[in-house]
Image (cartoon, rainbow, N blue to C red):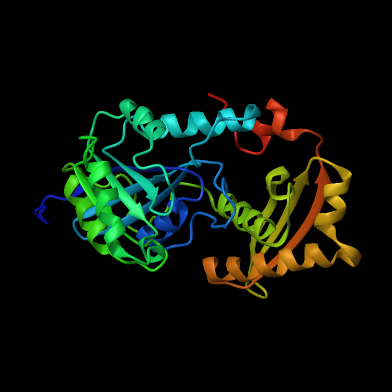
Amino acid sequence: MHDRARPSAGFVSLVGRPNSGKSTLLNRLVGEKLAIVSPRPQTTRNRITGIRNLPEAQIVFVDTPGLHAPAGKLGAFMRQTIERALEDVDLVCVIADVTERRHPDPEILEMLVRHRGPAYCVLNKTDRLRAKARLLPLIDAWQGTGRFREIVPISALHGTNCDRLLRLIVDALPEHPAFFPPDATSDQPETFYVAEMIREKVFMLTHEEIPYAVAVRVEELTERKAPEALYIRATIFVERDSQKGILIGHAASMLKRIGTAARRDLEAFFGIKVYLALTVQVRAEWRKDDRALREFGFLRTS
């Protein structure tokens, strides 16, 4: 264990297949709702940094999009995001869904070559295994690759064994001063999380292609004193007029449902009353447009 007089700090990447539970685990380990969580795969598009401050350590978590074959410019960006997240980090945690068939996952092992430091295999969703004896061959399979320092079965949803995982992560970090202030929970701006929470509600409330065609841009985020409240104005972008119609709904019913659900989460997140104004615009084929991808935060300018 680390000496409390000598604090440790470092960067930890969470990587895995779509819907393996990375975002749920990030939220669990950080103790804040930072990443959007949806039963649909491929919810996370950006690298999301969450920070957990402990008396003896600061852990900077990097969440990533689910590993899959890239499709189009947005898919290529997501793949590049994963590759960057494996470089220059102190620890990689591979999140594997125990209910999936492929163990170990050859593509994840191939990508792990980019990381020269320690790696943990986190076997998630153990709560879904009726027979716990099924865990043993999975542990043996991942251990047999010779690539992982620890194999940790957990349930991110219920928190089972997550405290042990947190202790093991701290043990892997180097001695180093904190990278961020002690009250920081992320290095992303507030507007990023506002957009993510709105996008999460679109994922939860709409169907088929709609969620994947959506981008959110926060136009205004202003704190007002009388009465004390946060005023947020945001635009939801889709690719076609038909998608816009579905998103707005009859008499704006769907847009109101999205806005109401997002406002509740935002009020819990910020701890203050929130006024949320949403509009919907069409930006044709934005997922294939470099300018739009940059404008919506998916392409770096450097």
The residue depicted at 25 percent of the width and 28 percent of the height is 116
Q: Nearer the viewer, residue 275 or 71?
A: 71
- Figure check: 76 above or below 203: above
Specify the farthest residue to the right. Answer: 251
The residue depicted at 86 percent of the width and 61 percent of the height is 249
Residue 172 x %, y %: 19, 45
- Figure check: 301 above or below 225: above
Res 74 → quadrant: top right
Can residue 299 be seen? no
Res 183 → quadrant: bottom left
Q: Nearer the viewer, residue 230 or 258?
A: 258
Residue 143 x %, y %: 22, 42
Residue 30 x %, y %: 37, 58
The residue depicted at 73 percent of the width and 58 percent of the height is 206
Specify the farthest residue to the top. Answer: 302
Q: Locate the N terminus by quadrant.
A: bottom left
Q: Nearer the viewer, residue 176 or 174?
A: 174
Looking at the image, how many numbered discs can be counted on the residues?
A: 0
Residue 167 is left or right of residue 256, and the answer is left
Specify the farthest residue to the bottom. Answer: 227
Residue 203 x %, y %: 66, 56
Residue 147 is left or right of residue 13, and the answer is left
Can residue 48 be seen? yes
The residue depicted at 59 percent of the width and 51 percent of the height is 191
